[in-house]
Amino acid sequence: MRLEIKNLKFGYNSKPVLKNINMEVSPGKITAVIGPNAAGKSTLLKCIVRILKPEGSILLDGKEINNFEKESITRIVSYLSQENPARAVLSVFEVVLLGRIHSLSWKVGDDELEVVWEILKDMGIHELASRYLNELSGGQRQMVSIAQALVREPKVLLLDEPTSNLDLQRQLEILYLIRDLTVKRKITTLVTLHHLNLAARYADKLVVLNNGEVYASGKPESVLTSETVRSVYGVNARVNIDDDGIPQITPISSVRNMCLA
Amino acid sequence: MEKKADIKAKEIYDEITGRKYALLFLFAAACVLALIIDILVGPAWLSIQEVFSAIFLANSSDPTTNVIVWTIRLPTALMAIAVGAALGIAGAEMQTILDNPLASPYTLGVSAGAGFGAALAIVLGVGIVPYAGEYLVSINAFFFSLLTCLLIYFIGKARRVTAETMVLAGIALLFLFQSLLALLQYIASEEALQVIVFWLFGSLLKTTWPKLAVVAAVLIIVVPLIAKDAWKLTALKLGDEKAKSLGIDVEKLRLKAFMLISLLTAAAVCFVGTIGFIGLVGPHIARMLVGEDQRFFLPMSALGGAALLSVASIGGKVIIPGAIFPIGIVTSLIGVPFFFSLILTKRRGYW
């Protein structure tokens, strides 16, 4: 499904967070939203999943998202929040099963069990299935949350910082898996990422958010320039194009430090 | 999908749930056992044959035994089970929707509200419903525990319905009703004071069949309504945002569950007085044993509460032979050591 965002505005207590967002997210592609802290990345995702009620319009295949039935929209859109539910006394299997909440009755059908088990295996966390969430490390819990988002077999996947808390190998594995699923199942995937080099490597399109506005968007190699990094992040950086044609950033210094010196 | 994977998924799931079913069965058996012993034990000890023939062959047994079993033992023992279950469920759902391990009918002031209502009837003879007769105290207690819940509800609703607001409102109301109760005790006559104090201890002694029927009816109506939302309530434990993204109307769910719990609590405490401990500890025991999947957490909290109160009822009768201790006191005396032993032997962190 094609996701379009038009003239989106949102503020917390009249303090504007998103000022006028226009963007488009295509199916079968990963679009990464990058930008400094408080740029409005998470808020944007929350608006799309309707946890927040913004002004402007959000369209799915040209149809206003508010005109969908509430239940059908939660079947279409899956969202990974930054909340880490450490306190729930639930096993990994149960947490992932909750992703299927719309198909669950008191007795859980075998189909549901299989879908859950498949995703646990795909992510390599099936051995944790019967462990309780509060026995796991932060990174393992993050994996469980991602599994819960993926098990819903969404058409639109919104992931807020999926790689935070994960070690380097897991970061690469998770982004690889997300890209694989995105392409195979034609999912419209929108992720927020702090890690610019990972974003450049795995995303088909980058959207740079700064102060609640889209600063730039497009293919990684056209967006990630030392000029962008400098004016958005306030960081002097060297940008090299690696052998795969992907821009990789080497940060050098903060602009602020230079001023002080 | 490969065949092997299918089998494995089911195996893992059965392994997770199998243990929980076993524990549920164990606690259900414990409840039945406690219920039977509760009927046998008392100032006059009865044999199993006597009780059996009194219950099932009413005509052929000794009339005294008949009266003891039918008018005292049976309703009292069943009331212990019903009230224990109601308080266990109420505590479990309060802890769930408020995401707070300290939430229970007692800590949120609902019991204190009931106590104040009861005292108001005892001291001033003022009832909410006129001509209530022997039910005056209970009806007042029922009304004031519902009132407490409604206050928490509306304070929660006035701002956005977050767990924190509701918990804080509940705790404030606890203090309010406690001081109002103290005020009544201060101005009460000596006889009235004694009645209040006894009511506050919590007691099953005044149980009658109609009172039991009220509690049972509320349980039968409310529990299926809560159980219907089992998956949603489980999802609430993952956090409000996650639950919302799963399509759950979090605020509506929270308010609906709260109303149901209020009814349950009010029905439970209005007849037996303030039994504080069950609603707090029943759910904690359940959580340690079966986790927070509501399909197991809900019945386990009910069974845990019921078993605990039933055992306390037995305990109250055997501590000093011939005398019956108020159950509110015994509950904590038996429950606290049991609870500590669970905390100390379980290594996992729960809250």
Image (spheres, coloured by chain):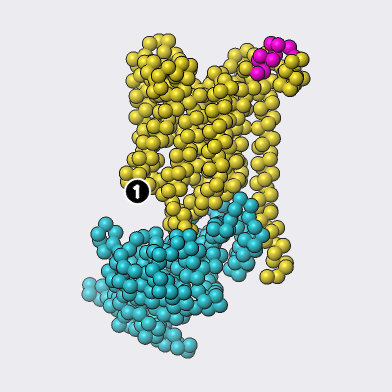
Chain colours: A cyan, B yellow
Residue at x-position 57% and y-position 31%: B216
Q: Is residue B67 magenta?
A: yes
Give the image location of residue A43, x and y in percent. 36, 64
Q: Chain of mark 1?
A: B
Give the image location of residue A141, x and y in percent. 52, 60
* Relative to A137, A256 lies left or right: left
Residue at x-position 32% and y-position 79%: A216
Residue at x-position 64% and y-position 52%: A107
Viewer-nearest residue: A14 or B280:
A14
Q: Dot 1 surroundings within 10 Å: few (below 14), some, or many (20 or more)?
A: few
Q: Is residue B259 magenta?
A: no
* Relative to B58, A121 lies left or right: left
The secondary element bearing badge 1 is classed as: loop
Give the image location of residue A245, x and y in percent. 45, 88
For disc 1, the marked residue is B160
- Main secondary structure found in the magenta portion: helix
* Residue A55 seen from this side: yes
Residue at x-position 42% and y-position 17%: B131
Viewer-nearest residue: A259 or B47:
B47
* Relative to B330, B136 lies left or right: left
Residue type pointed to by label 1: Arg
The answer to whether residue B252 is above or below residue A254 is: above
The residue segment tinted magenta is B61-70
* Relative to B17, B249 lies left or right: left
Give the image location of residue B108, x and y in percent. 42, 35
